[in-house]
Image: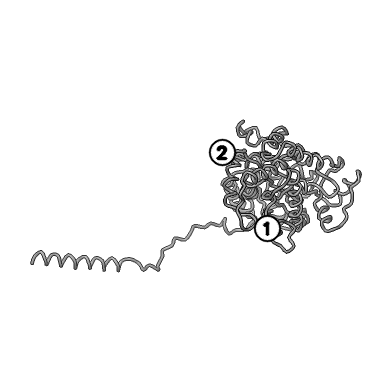
Amino acid sequence: MVIADHSTRSEDHDEDDDVSNRVDLPPPAVKISIPKASSKYDFVKVKVWLGDNADHYYVLSRFLLSRMLTVTKIPNHVAIKIALELKKLLIDNSLLDVSQSDLEANLFKLMERRGYGEEYINRYKMMTRFHHQRVPLVILVCGTACVGKSTIATQLAQRLNLPNVLQTDMVYELLRTATDAPLASSPVWARDFSSSEELITEFCRECRVVRKGLAGDLKKAMKDGKPIIIEGIHLDPSIYLMDDENKLPTDISPKVEEPNSLTSDEKNVMETESNPSVDSANHSENRNGSPQNARSVERIHADLLNRVSDHLESIDIAASDSADRGETPKDPEAGNPPAKKEKSGAEPIIIPIVLKMAEFDHEALLDEWISTRTFSDKCLIQDKDKLISNLKTIQNYLCSFKSQGLTVVNISATTFPQTLDWLHSYLLQCIEQGIPSDFSGSGRQPAEN
């Protein structure tokens, strides 16, 4: 009996404890939240006045300022701290109405204090001038499948604070499935051709069709002076760097040296292709063809590039737009380009970049990519070697523009951060060389974001 009573009392005691525990706990619906700490720096507005007579102003945004600092290659976490320090400095000194010049003077002092001196300040001034002038900027990220075009385009857009990234794949699919589609149901690299020359000719034709599909976006970018990045397989740089009468200029883009801080291995990754390597690649990729087919591709390049007009100093994409609409473009005369610049203002900056990868790594990625794709909407591609050969032929065609000044960048997983950093510097230098240097409008209102 004693044992039984003890057991009963123990069970009763446990039940009492459970009841007491349930009573002491707060209801599940009740949540205790600690309000986040806030400060006056989050709510007080600082007006930055523009113009000679200070007749316009904008409200200082720490976020936008930090993004602008990131463009100059200041690390993001440091840019955020500098933007906060600037707002604290202004508010603590009751400077709630400041001029743009006073704002920048204080900003540059804070940048120098953190070790980001003249080089970064000059980049900031240059990018400010670029936005003020609304210079049209088109960055082309070209290459075949699986070389990292989308990744590079997205990363560069984030680093340079560019909001618009267009993918030619989307335009291609819309045109391919449209009524009376001008494109075949299967991609050009998945079809049979009698020669490499025939393949390249069809590839260029499809690129022109896609270019017309992008005409509206390009025209708006040219008119509004907004930067845009275009990436995809159907990008033939020559189409964007010419009008209907003038082919590729001899100097496509500024010559920019690679940073000295890179190691020799990193420089090799980003080393542009030389003509002998392109020639050897042309011969090696023709497994089912002959060296004559590879040379026929070179003849296309020669025919395309030999028609360069020596007096062509700048390219106007709007001219090709008018040609696409059926209008007759006017042939520029030798003395006309300066007058045209005075009329139209800043010339567009067009920066083409071709991405490629080491053959072994690229072929492994292509093999996996092909196995997961379907062509002609039904059947899987059967001859992988043939498809890879076609893609290599197109890649060699794109890399052949190296001799005309186009930048070809090798992509590798081991040196990807260094490659991205080099491209960031390269694009900044291209922009600096492309914008007019005689602009005197620092007091004007900047373009709205």
- Return the x and y of residue 440 as percentages of the image width and height: 79, 47
Q: Nearer the viewer, mark 2 or mark 1?
A: 1
State the quadrant of the C terminus. Answer: bottom right
25 on left or right of 224:
left
- Return the x and y of residue 336 as percentages of the image width and height: 90, 46
Label 1's element?
A: helix
420 on left or right of 323:
left
Q: Which residue is mark 2?
A: 414
Instruction: Rate crowding at label 2 as few (under 14), some (14 to 19) or many (20 or more) other CA atoms within 10 Å.
Output: few
Residue 427 appears in the figure = no
Real-space Cα separation, disc 2 to disc 1, in angstroms: 33 Å
In this view, which residue lies farthest toward the left?
Answer: 1
Residue 435 appears in the figure = yes
**Residue 173 shows which numbered tag?**
1
Callout 2 amino acid: Thr
| Front residue (pair 228, 57) | 228
Callout 1 amino acid: Glu
Question: Where 23 falls versus 308 (above or below)?
Answer: below
Label 2's element?
A: loop
**Residue 212 shows which numbered tag?**
none
State the quadrant of the N terminus. Answer: bottom left
Question: Where 142 falls versus 209 (above or below)?
Answer: above
Marks 2 and 1 close (CB-CB < 8 Å): no
- Return the x and y of residue 141 as percentages of the image width and height: 68, 47
| Front residue (pair 160, 326) | 326
Q: Residue, x 77% and y 40% (percent of image)?
A: 296
Q: Residue, x 57% and y 42% (percent of image)?
A: 364
